[in-house]
Image (cartoon, helix red, strand yellow):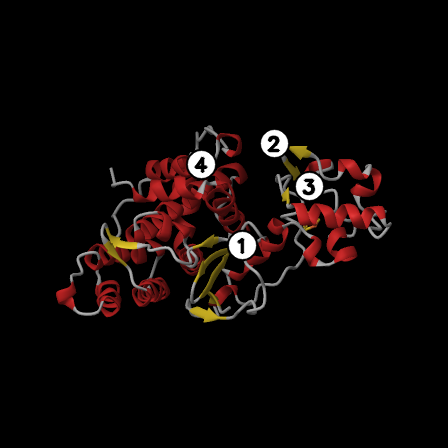
């Protein structure tokens, strides 16, 4: 099956940053994977003497909770199969197929359509985040960046009649392509992420007014987004940024929420250390928005293009709040490392923790 990805992600390969193996995440183990691990262990084919798993009885590697099996974690959230030299003991001994699905998929985010699979990455993976700062490639869709042979798990929309342009009017496949490509083009050309989003907000509003009398839907959408003009709000509203972060955090199941934080000093840190540097990071910020647009679940689970663009706005606001928090803690201006970490945390909220349907509902709400 063909895959479609964002140009700047095409160079991604696992560099063993270990972020995913040391996060203390609850990683489910599917029954075939469990059988494989237990069989290999019983036959002595799992030489894990370097791994924490080697110090545990086999029965403790895959604890049962809620009727499912999970990977055990050891000290500081390390997966028990993570070897001291920083490699996956399961993969080393039994191959990638012996890893749980979540391990094989990370950091990929997929929407599986009849015509191919759209793949983006979460920048909670630092290797993926670093790619956003490479300015050499235009923001565009590329085919088969990660090879067509891999199996993807994700939002499977094959046979689904969605998304809609507006209630009762469905986007046809060509119109979906037109929306994605026109959005990427606006993100590529705009002087700032805010300018791109203002134009896109105006563009999706116009696109939604399509009628059969306007001709084919795809060129109408391409024109609506390509020609739209919109100006970002004059004064930046930091209260809105903090509210967006809280709203996105509220999309996570209660056990995964960060919860209310003491944001004293964030607004001042934003004014002193984030705002002056923000414009210098226009390109990685626009690349991040492009990454959240490709393989957008909100497009399918929320109110179509309008919600997909709204999710980008909320995400950018939340990211700004995370940058202010980082600057307040470090007491210095926003720099590349700080922004990269903040992007990773924004994706942790939006991609890893948020219930996708809750995020889609948030992005589909009328603006207050
Ligand atoms: S099974 Fe392997 S890839 Fe998965 S979390 Fe453990 S060490 Fe990492």
Q: Where is residue 135 shown, x and y percent of the image?
A: 47, 67
Q: How many marks?
A: 4
Residue indicated by mark 1: 153
- Image point (19%, 58%), residue name: 206
- Crowding at mark 4 (Cα within 10 Å: few <14, some 14-19, many 20+): many
Residue indicated by mark 2: 66
Q: Is residue 218 above or below residue 242?
A: below
Q: Where is residue 234 shown, x and y percent of the image?
A: 25, 48
Q: Where is residue 281 shown, x and y percent of the image?
A: 43, 56
- Image point (34%, 41%), residue name: 361
Q: Nearer the viewer, mark 4 or mark 1?
A: 1
Q: Where is residue 132 shown, x and y percent of the image?
A: 49, 60
The Cα atoms of the two marked residues, 4 and 1, are separated by 24 Å
Who comes first in sequence, dot 4 or dot 2?
2
Q: Is residue 10 left or right of residue 103?
A: left
Q: Secondary structure at mark 3?
A: loop
- Crowding at mark 3 (Cα within 10 Å: few <14, some 14-19, many 20+): many
The Cα atoms of the two marked residues, 4 and 2, are separated by 24 Å
The Cα atoms of the two marked residues, 2 and 1, are separated by 22 Å
Q: Is residue 212 left or right of residue 93?
A: left
Residue indicated by mark 3: 71
């Amino acid at each position: 099956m063909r895959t479609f990805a964002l140009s700047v992600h095409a160079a991604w390969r696992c560099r063993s940053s270990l972020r995913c193996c040391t996060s203390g995440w609850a990683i489910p183990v599917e029954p075939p994977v469990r059988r494989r691990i237990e069989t290999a262990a019983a036959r002595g084919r799992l030489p894990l003497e370097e791994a924490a798993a080697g110090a545990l009885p086999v029965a403790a590697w895959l604890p049962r909770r809620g009727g499912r099996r999970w990977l055990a974690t050891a000290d500081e959230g390390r997966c028990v199969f993570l070897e001291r030299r920083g490699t996956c003991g399961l993969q080393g001994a039994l191959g990638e197929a012996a890893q749980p699905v979540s391990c094989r998929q990370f950091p990929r985010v997929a929407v599986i359509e009849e015509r191919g699979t759209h793949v983006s990455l979460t920048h909670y993976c630092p290797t993926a985040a670093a790619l956003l700062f490479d300015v050499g490639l235009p923001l565009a869709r590329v085919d088969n960046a990660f090879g067509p042979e891999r199996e993807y798990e994700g939002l499977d929309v094959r046979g689904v009649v969605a998304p809609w342009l507006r209630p009762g009017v469905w986007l046809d496949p060509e119109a979906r392509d037109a929306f994605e490509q026109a959005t990427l083009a606006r993100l590529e050309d705009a002087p700032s992420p805010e300018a791109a989003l203002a134009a896109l907000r105006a563009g999706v509003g116009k696109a939604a007014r399509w009628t059969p009398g306007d001709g084919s839907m795809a060129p109408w959408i391409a024109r609506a987004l390509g020609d739209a003009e919109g100006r970002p709000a004059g004064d930046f509203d930091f209260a809105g940024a903090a509210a967006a972060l809280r709203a996105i955090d509220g999309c996570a199941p209660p056990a995964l929420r960060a919860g209310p934080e003491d944001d004293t000093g964030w607004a001042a840190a934003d004014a002193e250390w984030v705002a002056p540097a923000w414009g210098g990071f226009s390109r990685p910020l626009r690349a991040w928005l492009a990454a959240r647009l490709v393989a957008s679940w909100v497009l399918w689970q929320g109110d179509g293009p309008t919600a997909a663009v709204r999710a980008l706005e909320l995400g950018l606001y939340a990211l700004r709040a995370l940058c202010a928090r980082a600057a307040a803690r470090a007491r210095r201006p926003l720099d590349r490392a700080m922004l990269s970490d903040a992007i990773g945390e924004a994706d942790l909220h939006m991609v890893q923790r948020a219930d996708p349907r809750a995020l889609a509902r948030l992005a589909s709400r009328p603006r207050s």
